[in-house]
């Protein structure tokens, strides 16, 4: 696993930080349950930054195995094409596929759209709010 230097990592709450400056991730489980928030320790600050994302999500964006970026881009493009094809399929064909073949196209359309929305990232944050300590 390699840390990708210079990559901007979204920490949540409108905060971004360079991947090569993040030196530690500590999940906050008290009162919220696992996978909800993380303290992010960076080389240039004494206090951690509060992130609204899990340590696994942050780590996944910081690091990758060689060649993963190309494969991920190709897979995302293929899934987007599949989503378009499924969405353009006539309803009668969707019902036939579900009844005769057990393929629920409507379920897959919803699931792929949810994944695409998640990959799109957070809503646009005004530039002046990106560096608020909040």
Image: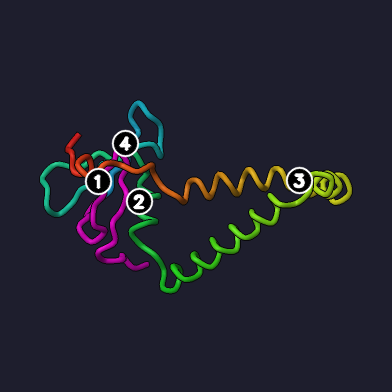
Q: Quadrant of the N terminus?
A: bottom left
> On the picture, is 120 further left or further right than 52?
right
For marks 2 and 3 on the same chain, the one whose residue lies earlier in the sequence = 2
Picture layout, residue 83 above or below residue 99: below
Residue 57 percent coordinates (x, y): 40, 49
Please check the rendered image and state whether residue 16 is part of the magenta-colored stretch, yes or no.
yes
Which residue reaches farthest bottom?
Answer: 67
User: In this picture, which residue range is highlighted in magenta?
Assistant: 1-24
Q: Quadrant of the C terminus?
A: top left
Q: Quadrant of residue 80?
A: bottom right
- Tell which tag, 2 or 3, sits nearer the viewer: 3
Q: Quadrant of residue 84?
A: bottom right
Q: Is residue 97 visible?
A: yes
| Gap between marks 4 and 2 measured at Cα | 14 Å
* Pointer 3 local density, CA inside 10 Å: few below 14, some 14–19, many at least 20: some
Q: Is residue 38 visible?
A: no
List the residue tagged with mark 4: 28
| Gap between marks 2 and 1 measured at Cα | 9 Å
Say which mark, if any, is on residue 40: 1
For marks 3 and 4 on the same chain, the one whose residue lies earlier in the sequence = 4
| Residue at the image position 31 percent from the left and 65 percent from the top | 3
| Gap between marks 1 and 4 measured at Cα | 10 Å
Please check the rendered image and state whether residue 112 is part of the magenta-colored stretch, yes or no.
no
Which one is nearer the viewer's eye here, 84 or 134? 84
List the residue tagged with mark 3: 104
> On the picture, is 20 further left or further right than 62?
left
Say which mark, if any, is on residue 58: 2
| Residue at the image position 60 percent from the left and 63 percent from the top | 78
Which residue reaches farthest top?
Answer: 31
Q: Secondary structure at mark 4?
A: strand
């Amino acid at each position: 696993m390699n840390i990708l230097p210079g990559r901007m990592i979204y920490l949540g709450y409108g905060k971004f930080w360079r991947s090569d400056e993040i030196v530690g991730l500590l999940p906050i489980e008290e009162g919220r349950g696992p996978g909800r928030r993380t303290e992010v320790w960076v080389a240039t600050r004494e206090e951690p930054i509060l992130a609204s994302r899990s340590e696994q999500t942050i780590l996944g964006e910081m690091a990758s195995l060689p060649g993963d970026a190309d494969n991920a881009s190709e897979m995302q493009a293929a899934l987007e094409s599949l989503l378009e094809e499924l969405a353009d399929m006539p309803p009668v064909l969707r019902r036939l596929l579900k009844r005769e073949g057990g393929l629920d196209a409507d379920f897959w359309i919803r699931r792929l759209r949810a994944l695409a929305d998640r990959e799109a990232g957070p809503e646009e944050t005004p530039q002046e709010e990106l560096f608020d300590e909040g």
